[in-house]
Image (cartoon, helix red, strand yellow):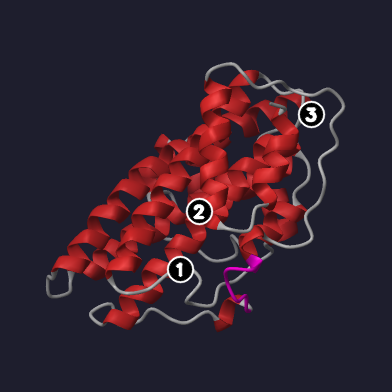
């Protein structure tokens, strides 16, 4: 089996169930050493996200709000929004492995492992949606993560934007969701959502850390300082660090962020 060609086929697969099946088959062969890296394979740019058939896409501001988590509708909207992040993250991890050739094998090991984790997270969330009588695709979604993958076509920019900015933002957002749920009257579904979010949060730290390692690698390869991170984020997200951010300091430090970076993001000394 050819590495890049098979990843391209998986990335273009529209059905979530079929995409996951194809990846599992591929990943088993990869771990068994039965996949060949082609030489001079040219990665393509994708015109639309793989979920375009499954989900209706709208601008981010038009995605349904998940304000009241004590209602079934609010719980579905929350679970669907996070499931969409995790589904998009499957393709982001696969695209990271697919798009950048001639990297150390550990690079491909890392991002395929991330893809496997994101699949597991997606399936956990999909199971809760099913319990509520909903499916992935029932709620409108945005294309922000897909668009990020199509803009960042160098390793340096991809590692800065996807794991060290977008995914790292999830390290800050998830604890706030958990705190909001904790203040609500307990019920079985909220307890299941809480348990699932804890699994995702714990494992996303390692994903951001992988991004940090390969961002350092790209900085060294290009002969630039790690401070270029803020220039890259400002290029794609000019509002990204204008205001102080409510940071998950412990998780971000574990994931490789320096105190200098965290103090800049928080606009005060936090470590």
Q: Nearer the viewer, residue 266 or 54?
A: 54
* Mark toward the viewer: 1 or 3: 1
Q: CA distance from mark 2 to mark 1?
A: 18 Å
Question: Which mark is nearer the camera, 2 or 1?
Answer: 2
User: Badge 1: few (under 14), some or many (20 or more) residues near its Cα, within 10 Å?
Assistant: many
Q: Position of residue 28 (x, y in %)?
A: 51, 27
Q: Are marks 2 and 3 in contact (CB under 8 Å)?
A: no
- Could you say whether the residue bearing mark 3 is in a helix, strand or loop? helix
Outermost residue, left direction? 186
Q: Which residue is mark 3?
A: 222
Extent of the magenta region: 52-58
The residue positioned farthest toward the top in the image shown: 33
* Residue under numbered circle 1: 81
Cα separation between marks 1 and 3: 36 Å
Left or right: 160 with respect to 191? right
Is residue 38 depicted above or below 259 in this figure?
Answer: above
Which residue corresponds to the image point at 58% horizontal and 24% vertical from the top-left?
Answer: 30
Instruction: Give the labeled residue for mark 2.
Output: 17
Q: Earlier in the sequence, mark 1 or mark 3?
A: 1
**Where does residue 201 sit, x and y in percent of width and height?**
36, 48
Q: Earlier in the sequence, mark 2 or mark 1?
A: 2
Verify whether residue 56 appears in magenta. Answer: yes
Nearest the viewer among 20 and 221 is 20
Q: Are marks 2 and 1 in contact (CB under 8 Å)?
A: no
Q: Nearer the viewer, residue 253 or 73?
A: 73
Q: Which label's residue is closer to the chain start, 2 or 3?
A: 2
Mark 3: few/some/many CA within 10 Å (<14, 14-19, 20+): few
């Amino acid at each position: 089996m050819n590495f890049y060609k098979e990843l391209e086929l998986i990335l273009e697969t529209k059905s979530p169930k079929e995409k996951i099946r194809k990846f599992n088959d591929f990943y088993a062969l990869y771990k068994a050493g039965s996949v060949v890296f082609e030489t001079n394979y040219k990665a393509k740019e994708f015109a639309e996200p793989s979920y375009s058939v499954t989900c209706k896409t709208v601008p981010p501001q038009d995605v349904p709000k998940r304000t009241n988590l004590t209602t079934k509708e609010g719980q579905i909207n929350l679970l669907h929004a996070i499931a969409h992040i995790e589904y998009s993250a499957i393709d982001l991890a696969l695209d990271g492995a697919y798009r950048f050739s001639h990297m150390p094998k550990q690079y491909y090991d890392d991002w395929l492992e991330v893809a496997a984790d994101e699949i597991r997270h997606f399936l956990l969330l999909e199971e809760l949606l099913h319990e509520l009588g909903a499916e992935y695709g029932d709620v409108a979604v945005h294309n922000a993560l897909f668009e990020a993958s199509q803009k960042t076509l160098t390793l340096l920019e991809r590692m800065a934007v996807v794991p060290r900015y977008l995914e790292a933002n999830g390290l800050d957002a998830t604890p706030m969701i958990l705190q909001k749920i904790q203040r609500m009257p307990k019920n079985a579904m909220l307890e299941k959502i809480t348990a699932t979010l804890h699994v995702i949060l714990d494992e996303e730290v390692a994903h951001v850390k992988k991004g940090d390692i390969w961002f350092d690698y790209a900085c060294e390869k290009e002969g630039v300082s790690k401070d270029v991170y803020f220039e890259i984020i400002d290029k794609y997200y000019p509002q990204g660090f204008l205001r102080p951010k409510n940071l998950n300091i412990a998780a971000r430090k574990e994931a490789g962020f320096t105190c200098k970076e965290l103090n800049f993001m928080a606009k005060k000394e936090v470590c």
